[in-house]
Amino acid sequence: MSHGDDPDASSVIPWTAQLDLDRPCGAVSSGETCWLLSDFPAWNSVIHALDIDLEETVPGTLRLRFLPKAQEKGDYVTAARGASVVVSSLLCHHLCIQEVYLRCAISANTPPAQPSFPIYMRRQSSSPASRSLRLLRVTESPCLVYKCAAATASAHLDLRDMDAVIGLETLYINIGRFSQSFASEIDALLERNRNTLRSLEIFEARPGLYKLRMVQDLTACKFLALKSLGNIDTVMPDVEGMVSLLRGSTALKDVTVEPMLPRQLLLIAKTLETNCCLTKLSLHVMSPYSIEELFGALEVNKHLKELYLCSFISVNLTSNAARAVASALENNNSLQTLCMKGPYFPDGEMGQWSKALSKNCTLELLRMRCYYFPVSEVSALCKALRVNKTLKTLKLWEVRGSEEER
């Protein structure tokens, strides 16, 4: 492996003499199980000092984790240089490593600190220009290597060559905000793996101007989650690519959006009217608007089996929306699981919901927070559910009232 960017790489830390960093992967050279599968416990005893560890997950393959902890290091620069060399060497030499967990800075997204050390995903001076991975989890570390490091004593580790990964099945990205260049790099990664990627989860804490364009082309994707911080009222995950994928995909089964604006909920509701593949939907709903359209879509959708409405607690339902909920619960013939944090129902509307649930013939699990429901209405709901023939599990929590009433 070449470490030409760092002339001091050969003298990183004295203990590197204990590691054969340039020995080729046995799984590549001989077609047999790599020697590292036997040696990784001994490696761990050395590299744990840098918060790096190896673990066998699937027989014959390894997981590499580099998750710097919030603890003090005697020499941050030396530790960062060592981590750069060891992680890069393992990734560049060992195709037996098929799962990678990294916490590091992203050079395309964060102004580099000095000194700065790269983590390479592939060899820099030879072919092939790609490397296979089954799983990649990248968490952006905004404060460089070690969170407790003072600004004057920290060191910067940045990830390179992510778009060189092929064969990817699971991708998780946790980032503060996409820059234009990093969004382009992720799009290139998605395009290269559009036929293999099965699970994609993106957490962008504070979404900005730059969006991912390739989500809509992930034809093999079964699970898709787009998330951001839940305390921002105007900036939410971009769902347009997800909606486009929902319209045409026959593979996508499980979707999560946290949080979302009413216009985004409306887009998903319209898609649900014709979608025939999605079976699980989790939404972080923060407004009563478009709730009526969502449950109206559920009245005609014949395939969704699980619905999770998070943060529904803050929603004040209109009478029309409450009636739409009741109508969907009475007429939907596919939904088996409904979990929601109980919203505010207009006076008298809870009774319609109880009546609808008594007639429902598919629901098997109902879970709901009842803090804002009078105990009398909760009692009426329980009585109505006695005649329901399919419900197997009922979980009602934070029911108000005296111990005797509850």
Image: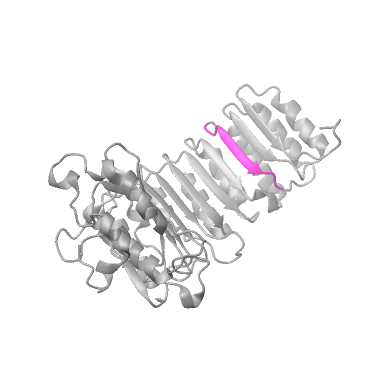
Left of 385 or right of it: where is 276?
A: left
- Residue depicted at x 54% and y 31%: 333
Is 17 situated above or below 307?
below
Q: How many marks?
A: 0
Estimate the x, y position of residue 4 in percent, counting from the top left.
22, 72
| Image quadrant containing the C terminus | top right
Residue at 77%, 35% in the rendered image:
378
In the displayed structure image, the side of residue 356 where residue 29 appears, left or right: left
Give the percent coordinates (x, y) of residue 120. Answer: 28, 63
Q: Quadrant of residue 325?
A: top right
Q: Where is residue 65 drawn, in percent x and y?
A: 38, 52
Observer-nearest residue: 40 or 219? 40
Magenta stretch in the rendered image: 334-343
- Residue 299 placement, left or right of 109: right
Is residue 170 something one can see in this rendering? no
Residue 108 image-quadrant placement: bottom left
The verdict on residue 339 being magenta is: yes
Is residue 383 rendered to the left or right of residue 178?
Answer: right
Asked if residue 80 can be seen in this view, the reply is yes
Closer to the camera in the image, 280 or 387? 280
Q: Nearer the viewer, residue 226 or 28?
A: 28
Q: Quadrant of the N terminus?
A: bottom left
Residue 264: percent from left, percent from top:
52, 57
Q: Residue at x 27, y 42 (%)?
A: 37
